[in-house]
């Protein structure tokens, strides 16, 4: 037998012995933990997860309840599947569950050590979050960048308009991705990273998805920590290669900016990169600029583009709903006008469409937390270092909170005070508590402006005579959710 294969098998055997030891040692604590399916020796409940763990865990919660324990290899994991339980975790015990369980994939290139997403909630995390909030996400900054968002949307609309004369279908996810990517790249670097007609657009989109896909994969290194040095499935190796590709883009732009600043002290771009370089120079800090940029580009582009694509898919699948949304837009904004962000407040039905999309198609289906101490929840004890997964996807489809939960019904939000900003736990699209997504307001502005503009400027129909009921609504699971089949639709310019 090859020596390397022998080493792998020996390491796996050690991990199995270690897992069995943990299961036996923790057996006496089982009564304190929330209920859950009986774990098999060594592997625990790993086989219960499936390729779409958000769905598998939601199904298990019907049997074991909204606070449920699984043994995933060596890792004790508590699953939260209802609004009430999410409130207990993310509001009443927010500080105790503000930790992060770090997937081995994001240890590639030490990405986790400089990431707002994956750092523990310590002083470094607070400092990095403050930098991002102050220079990108404040209301003042968002208002000052309205013109930039309008410009990026208009570029997409112009591109779609060219398709109207030829009757070609438009890849909705692709154009939405270009719009959000170039918005973020202009906010960060003052340049467009991709062009709508370039092949590099799809390459960049695929790169971002592959990073998120690796993060979301079932990884033996996460379930059996003894296997981390081996990287048995080569997930960390692939993640390293992917991050290096993204870093090459960032390295070139950072190097150009450093040279520009050195040669022209009086001229500045006053974008996020300038702010990061200023902060690093003035405070002599060794924080990882590229890790912050990875956070912004992976979290900011994929989730917004996917939400726009899912929203358009639901509208095409429900023609009466699309007709209502377009009617509201055309009654509020004439055809010869552009949609402005200030118009959104006058479009309650459009806002309801976006909220309903957030509910049905949570961009981040499983919110990852970790117990920082022993915590008592509803008569159960969640031990320190327990991994906690809040199933935002299941909560958005919980029949106790949402009548007819599988149906796309924007009307349920008309006259409703339920919102997605972390206070209403029936709809925790962006999380809640101190770990809530800092880009929530930027994402909402971009999604609503883009969706409103697509609906206001064009009528839409499915290609090849496809009927709405024949649409493929399957999705792929990664760190986020993405449509399995890209949405293509034919735009028709209204006369």
Image (cartoon, helix red, strand yellow):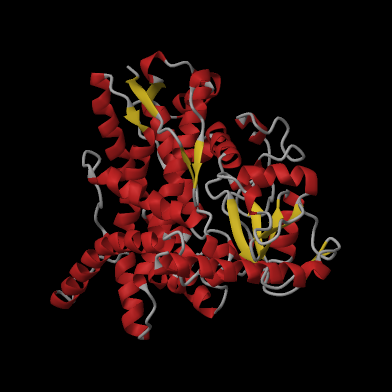
Q: Is residue 168 above or below residue 111?
A: above
Q: Position of residue 219 (x, y in %)?
A: 52, 59
Tell me if I can see residue 147 in this picture.
no
Left or right of 256 in this view: 418: right
Tell me if I can see residue 469 in this picture.
yes
Q: Dividing the picture into quarters, in which one does residue 348 lie? A: top right
Q: Residue furthest left?
A: 263
Question: 23 or 192: nearer the eye?
Answer: 23
Q: Dividing the picture into quarters, in which one does residue 135 lie? A: bottom left
Question: 161 or 225: nearer the eye?
Answer: 225
Q: Position of residue 350 (x, y in %)?
A: 52, 33
Q: Residue furthest front?
A: 1
Quadrant showing the N terminus: bottom left
- Residue drawn at (23%, 27%), measured in percent from left and top? 162
- Residue drawn at (35%, 34%), measured in percent from left and top? 338
Q: Position of residue 258 (x, y in %)?
A: 21, 73
Q: Is residue 108 above or below residue 181?
A: below
- Residue drawn at (61%, 46%), measured in percent from left and top? 54
Q: Position of residue 438 (x, y in %)?
A: 51, 60
């Amino acid at each position: 037998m090859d020596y390397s294969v022998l080493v792998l098998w020996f390491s796996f055997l050690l991990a199995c012995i270690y897992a069995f030891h943990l299961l036996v040692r923790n057996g006496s604590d089982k009564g304190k933990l929330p209920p859950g399916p009986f774990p098999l020796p060594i592997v625990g409940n790993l086989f219960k997860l499936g390729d779409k763990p958000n769905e598998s865990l939601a199904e298990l919660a019907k049997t074991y309840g909204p606070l449920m324990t699984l043994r995933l290899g060596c890792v004790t994991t508590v699953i939260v599947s209802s609004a009430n339980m999410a409130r207990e975790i993310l509001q009443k015990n927010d500080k105790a569950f503000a930790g992060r369980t770090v997937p081995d994939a994001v240890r590639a290139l030490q990405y986790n050590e400089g990431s707002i997403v994956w750092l523990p909630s310590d002083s470094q995390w607070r400092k990095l979050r403050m930098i991002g909030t102050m220079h990108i996400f404040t209301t003042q900054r968002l208002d000052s960048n309205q013109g930039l968002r309008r410009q990026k949307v208009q570029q997409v609309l112009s591109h779609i308009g060219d398709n109207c004369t030829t009757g070609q279908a438009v890849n909705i996810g692709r154009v939405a991705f270009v719009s959000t990517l170039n918005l973020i790249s202009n906010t960060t670097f003052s340049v467009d990273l991709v062009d709508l007609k370039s092949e590099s657009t799809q390459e960049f989109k695929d790169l971002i998805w592959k990073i998120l896909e690796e993060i979301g994969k079932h990884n033996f290194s996460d379930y059996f920590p003894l296997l981390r040095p081996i990287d048995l499935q080569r997930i960390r190796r692939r993640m390293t290669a992917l991050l290096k590709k993204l870093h090459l883009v960032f390295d070139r732009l950072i190097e150009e900016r450093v040279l520009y600043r050195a040669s022209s002290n009086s001229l500045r771009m006053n974008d996020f990169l300038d702010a990061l370089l200023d902060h690093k120079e003035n405070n002599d800090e060794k924080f990882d600029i590229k890790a912050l940029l990875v956070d912004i580009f992976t979290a900011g582009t994929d989730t917004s583009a996917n939400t726009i694509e899912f929203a358009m898919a639901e509208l095409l699948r429900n023609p009466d709903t699309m007709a209502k949304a377009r009617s509201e837009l055309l009654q509020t904004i004439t055809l010869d006008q552009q949609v402005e962000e200030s118009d959104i407040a006058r479009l309650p039905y459009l806002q309801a469409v976006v909220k309903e999309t957030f509910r049905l198609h949570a961009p981040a289906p499983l919110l990852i937390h970790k117990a920082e101490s022993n915590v008592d929840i509803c008569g159960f004890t969640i031990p320190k270092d327990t991994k906690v997964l809040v199933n935002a996807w299941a909560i958005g489809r919980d029949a106790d909170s949402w009548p007819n939960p599988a149906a796309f019904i924007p009307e349920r939000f008309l006259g409703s005070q339920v919102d997605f900003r972390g206070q209403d736990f029936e709809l925790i699209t962006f999380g809640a508590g101190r770990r809530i997504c800092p880009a929530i307001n930027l994402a909402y502005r971009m999604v609503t402006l883009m969706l409103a503009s697509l609906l206001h400027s064009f009528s839409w129909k499915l290609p090849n005579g496809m009927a709405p009921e024949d649409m493929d609504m399957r999705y792929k699971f990664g760190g986020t959710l993405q449509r399995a089949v890209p949405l293509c639709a034919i735009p028709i310019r209204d006369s």
